[in-house]
Structure formats: C-alpha cells, structure tokens
Image (cartoon, coloured by chain):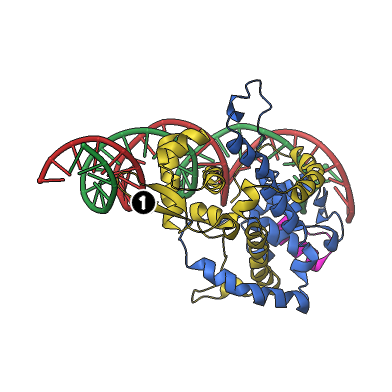
Chain colours: A yellow, B blue, C red, D green
Amino acid sequence: MTDYAVVLATHLAAVEGPHAARDLAVQTQIPEPTASKVLKKLARAGVVVSQRGAKGGYALARSPEHIGVNEVIEAIEGPIAVTECSDDTTDSSCEYETNCGVRANWQRINAAVHKALSEITLADMAFPGTAELVSIARSSNEAERMRAASPQSNDVH
Amino acid sequence: MTDYAVVLATHLAAVEGPHAARDLAVQTQIPEPTASKVLKKLARAGVVVSQRGAKGGYALARSPEHIGVNEVIEAIEGPIAVTECSDDTTDSSCEYETNCGVRANWQRINAAVHKALSEITLADMAFPGTAELVSIARSSNEAERMRAASPQSNDVH
DNA sequence: CCCAAATAGGACTGAAACAGTCCGGTATAT
DNA sequence: ATATACCGGACTGTTTCAGTCCTATTTGGG
C-alpha cells in the first residue's frame, strides 16, 4: 500500500494538473478502490488536495520538489515509530540503565530514517537527474548483497 | 521484535564478553524464549557469535564500531525490500513508462534507508558521544512535529 | 432545478504476518 | 556422566493489512 502511494504521488508529480482517482488507477495499474483509498489518505495528510464533484480530482498540494517521500510514506503508515521510554507512573522499566540508554537512543534511528527519506523529493522520483543515477549504480552492489539474506516481508515501514 | 534485537545487541556492545541468553533476557527485561529466538537470528546472520555447551553464550562477532544497526535490523526482518520491476516474461506491467520509472526509483528509497541505518553503529548506541547528542537535540523538533500526525503502528521494519 | 460525476468516510472480510511459547537434539565444560 | 546452554523448527492466538463495497456529500453542466 505504501508503494502504491509513492507510485501515485510520483505520477501526480510527473503529469501535473488534477486527475480523477479512476484515471490514476488505470494509468498506474493499481486496482481502483485501493487507489482511491490511498488517495484519500494522502489528501487527509495534506500531501495532495482534492476537488469534489464533477470535474473533480486530485493534485499535489505543493510543488514536487517540496514534497519528500517521507510525507507520502507517513501519510499511509503513520509517523515513524517513536518509542517513548516511560510516560507512565512506574519507572521500573528504567532501573537497568544500559537498557534504558538504548531506548533513549532508539529515536536516533528513527531520526536517521526520517532524514534520509525527507531528502528524496517527488521531483527526484519523477525526473531523476543523471547525477543521481550514478549514485544508484554505485549502491546496486549493496542491493544485490542484501538480496541474498532471508526471504521475508516487503514494505518499508 | 526488531527493537528487542537492537536492545540486545547494544547490551552486548556495552558490556563485552560472552553472555548466556538467559542473563541477557533478565538484564534487558525481555521474555527469555523471545530473547533466545532473537539471538539465534542474530547468530545466523553473523552479527553475533555463539558458544555452545556449559559456560557458553553470545558475544558480538566484531567490535561494536564495525557493526551498523542495519545489520541488526536486517538480521531480523530480512533485507530491506527490493521491488524488482520485472524478472518475468511479460513486460506488460512496464508499458506505462511513468509508472515503471517510479518502480526503478524505488530502490533509491531503500538505498537511502540502508545507508542511514548503516551509519549508526552499535558503538554509537552503547556509548553516545556528546557530539552526537547535539544532533539528537537538533532533530527533536522534527520528532515532535511528527508526533502530531496520525496514531498508528510502531515498528521500523 | 435536476442529474451525473466524483470524493469522503467508514464498515466489513479474508489472508498474511507476527510475537511468543515449547520441545527434542546437539555440543561442551566440569 | 551430567548439567548447562545453544540449535532448529513446529505450533498457536492475536493483530495487522490489503482489498472491497456501500452510503453520504459536494459540484459542474444541461
């Protein structure tokens, strides 16, 4: 579902102008009800704006270079997890300092992911420049090495 | 489960020396069978090494500063998703160029996440330096802004 | 003024993933 | 020999998720 959102948002970035949900579904090969659902979430999150009624449709809320893929992903999956250490009365879970230290640092991981994602804009996705294609080629070795490991779920979140 | 892995690995990085699964479970407040399961996966992926038999236990396979959290996370969840466009006969799913272009760029997102995660080592998690604490403070604004959005699942996976 | 087009919102369902547990097997110090 | 501790996998109940469908509500056009 998250990947659908990225595909749809990128398509909106590439073509520009309002699109009916049905048209987008056809053009992106995504089943229509699902595409509609995704677009609703994107609208709710403020990534796209919607126009109801006849001749209505969806369009990006801002210009593609000002929308990071993090916004698209978080619109679908909710905010990247922030494990709060203890907002509860019992701080018993914190009596082991080393463990608590880890949980405090957990947000560093989230921040890193968030930052990495926010640095990729829909403009990058829709109109990849040559400079960035190089960086893709360079990282393809890593990608292939990764593929060897375990065969499990997809999704980013 | 992924967060358990990070907690356990960080604990191994912080203390050093072999630890029995049971001890680790107690020290990290993680239910023992689950901790054991996680450790097995980490061993399988080569993040930690195991010593069987009496006086056995787990220890990091390498020094903490040479193990990125990406290794820990990928050991549990499998490699970060790589949506391959088409290794199939029918290239029908590629007849819409804009759509296919997106899928090609999808791996850029994965690469970015992978890179961000690999730049955080277990040493960073176990012994956070002051310099990096600054970067955490700086990014806490973002974190709080994120919190406002939608109330959904956690996990990084 | 009325109708058709199009989104908003939510209820519902079947399938998949996941956390957590448990057991029989194997290796190894004492 | 024996107690200790990891290895491997099977099993289960819960939860999440993708996908569908139905009923408003809004809006442009004849």
- Residue segment shown in magenta: B11-24
**Residue placed furthest toward the top:** B89
Toward the viewer: B67 or D28? D28
Q: Magenta span has A84?
A: no
Q: Residue at x 52, y 36 (%)?
A: A28
Q: Quadrant of residue B20?
A: bottom right
Q: Position of residue B98 (x, y in %)?
A: 59, 38
Left or right of residue B152: residue B127: right
Above/below status of A95 relative to A66: below
Residue type beneath disc 1: Gln
Regarding residue B1, the answer to whether it shows in the image is no
- Graded by Cα atoms within 10 Å as few (under 14), some (14 to 19) or many (20 or more), the crowding at tag 1 reads few
The image shows residue B140, relative to residue A110, as above or below, that is below
Residue A11 against residue B156 in the figure, above or below: above
**Residue B27 position in % (x across, y down):** 69, 66
Name the foreground residue: B62 vs A52.
A52
Name the one closer to the observer, B56 or D2: B56
Per the image, the residue denoted by label 1 is: A51
Nearest the viewer among B135 and B48 is B135
Where is residue C3? Give x, y as percent: 18, 36
Residue at the (47%, 68%) spot, across then down: B148
The percent position of residue B36, horizontal first and vertical second, equals 69, 51
Q: Residue at x 53, y 66 (%)?
A: B146
**Chain for mark 1?**
A
Secondary structure mostly seen in magenta is helix
- Give the total number of marks visible in the rendering: 1
Q: Secondary structure at mark 1?
A: strand
As displayed, is residue A94 above or below residue D16? below
Residue drawn at point x = 57 percent, y = 32 percent = B96
